[in-house]
Image (cartoon, helix red, strand yellow):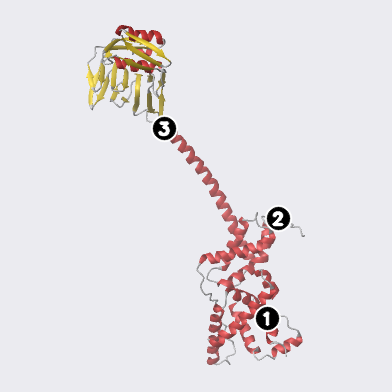
Amino acid sequence: MKKQLHDNICEEHLFSSIFNKYAKDLHDFLYYKFGELLNPKDKVQEAFVKLWQNCAKVTPDKAKSFLFTTANNLMLNEVAHQKVVLKYQQTKPKTSTNENPEFLMQESEYMDKLQRALANLTDAQREAFMMNRVEGKRFKEIAKILDISTKAVEKRIYGALEKLRRDIKEL
Amino acid sequence: MMDREFLISKWLNNDLNDQELEAFKALEDYDDLMKLTHSLQAFKADDYDTSKELERTLSAIRSSKKQTSWLKSFMRIAAILVICFGIYHYTTTLDTSVSTTMAQKTTISLPDASSVTLNAKSSIVFNKKSWKHERDIRLEGEAFFKVAKGETFNVITKSGTVTVYGTQFNVKQRKNYFEVICYEGLVGVTHNSQETKLKPGDSFLIIDGKLIAKEKESQPSPSWLHNESTFKSLPYKEVLAEFERQYNVNITTKNIDTKQLFSGSFAHNNLDVALQSITLPLQVTYSKVNNTIILTRE
C-alpha cells in the first residue's frame, strides 16, 4: 500500500498544486453540466474555499471527490434545475465572401438546432460529450474525472452523439 | 466492412489506426460528423485562467480568514463584557435580604450610617443600589432602627408604612399586631392611608385592627435590645406569641383567657425564670414536654 506523504492539505503549496490539478476540469465540468448562468468560476472558488476550511479533514486523495461533490451541490442548491442552454460564439464572417446569404442562413439555423439539441441531452450525457468533443479529453480521462467506468463514458458519449444527430435532423 | 458504431467510438476516443481511419472516412455520415464536431467548438466553455483563479481563491481565503478571526475575537470580548456587565448589574440591583429565625437576633449596618437590629423570626429586604435616593426597607416581624440623617427612610410592612426623618424607633408587625414606638426624632406612621406623627416617647399600636392608646414610653430604647421583653397592658396572647418566638417553643393554654391584659416582662436568656415571670402574676402553672409548654389555670 502506498503511504500518503501528507495526510491533509493545510499547507498552501499543497493546496495550490491541488488547485492547479483540478480547477480547470472542475470548471469545465460545471460549465457543461449547468451552463454559464450560475457562475461556474465562482462555484469553483467557493468549493476550494470550503476545501481549505476543511483541509484538516480531507486527505489529498479525497480532495477531488470533495471538490466535485461540493461544487455540484453548490450548483444544485442555487436553483431548481432547468434546461441548460449553452451559449455559442458567432462565427466570424470570413474574409472571402463566396458564401451566399442562403448558406449563411442555413449555417445559423444549424447552430440554433445544435444549441437546442444540446439542451435536450441529459446532464450526464452533455458533460461527458462536451469534455470529449470540445476539450478533447479521452474516455479514460473523463472516467477519472467523473469517477465512473470507461465503458460508461463511452456509452454516454456515443448515446449523446446519436441523440444529437437525431434531434438535429428532426428539428 | 467494419462496424459503424465501433468506428465512431474509436473516432470519438481519438483511437483510429490508419486502416480504420480510411473505413471511417468512407462512412456515409462522415461529413455530418465533421460538421457537427466543427460546430461544437463554438460552444467551448469560457476560458479558465488557472493561475489567475488560484490567486483569486487564495485572496478570498485570506480575507475570509482574517475577517472571521477578527470578528471571532471581537465577539468573544463583547460576550465577556456583556456577561460581566450582566452579573454586575444583576448583583448590584439585587435586593439584599436578612432574616432571623426563632431565638435569634442580629444587627445589620445599612449602606449609610443607619443600622437595623432584627428581633427573633423577622426579616428585612432592602436594595443597596437605590439606597442613596430611596431608603426603603420591607419588614416582616420586629426591628429597631437607628436612622442616619438623609433622605426619607421608609419601613414598609404589611400593616402600614413608617416614614422616618433621622431618628430611633421600633417597629413591631406581627399577626394582627402593629406597633411603632418613637425613641428619638420624628416618625410618621401611615396606616390605612392615614399618617400619624410620633414624637419621642409616643407609640402607635394597633391590635386586631383597633387603635390602642398607650402611655408615654420612658425607656430610651426597646427592652428587647437588652434581651428582655416588656409588656404594658397588652393581651396575654401577644406575650405568649413573643415568648414562643424568643425561646422557639410551642405554648398551649388550658382554661386561660388569652385576651386578658398583662403587664410585665421576661428575660430572653433563662427559660425557667422567664416562664415564672409570665405565669406567676396570673396564678398559672406550667409543665414542659420537649418543646411544648402547657399553661394551666388552677
> Residue A105, how many percent across, how many down?
53, 89
Judge by depth and name the residue closer to the eye, B124 or A50: B124
Q: Look at mark 3 in the image and give the residue it sits on.
A: B94
Badge 3: few (under 14), some or many (20 or more) residues near its Cα, within 10 Å? few
Judge by depth and name the residue closer to the eye, B21 or B100: B100
| Subunit of label 3 | B
Q: Look at mark 1 in the image and give the residue it sits on.
A: B12
Residue ranking furthest to the right: A1
Above or below for A81 versus B25: above
Q: Counting residues from the N terminus, which is met first, the one under dot 1 or under dot 3?
A: 1
Horizontal arrangement in the rendering, residue B148 relative to residue A154 (left or right): left
Three-letter code for the amino acid on which mark 2 is drawn: Asp
Mark 2 vs mark 1, CA separation in Å: 38 Å
Three-letter code for the amino acid on which mark 3 is drawn: Leu
Above or below for B268 versus B98: above
Number of marks: 3
Please tell me which residue is depicted at 66% across the width and 64% down the height of the picture: A64
- Label for residue A7? 2
Residue B187 position by quadrant: top left
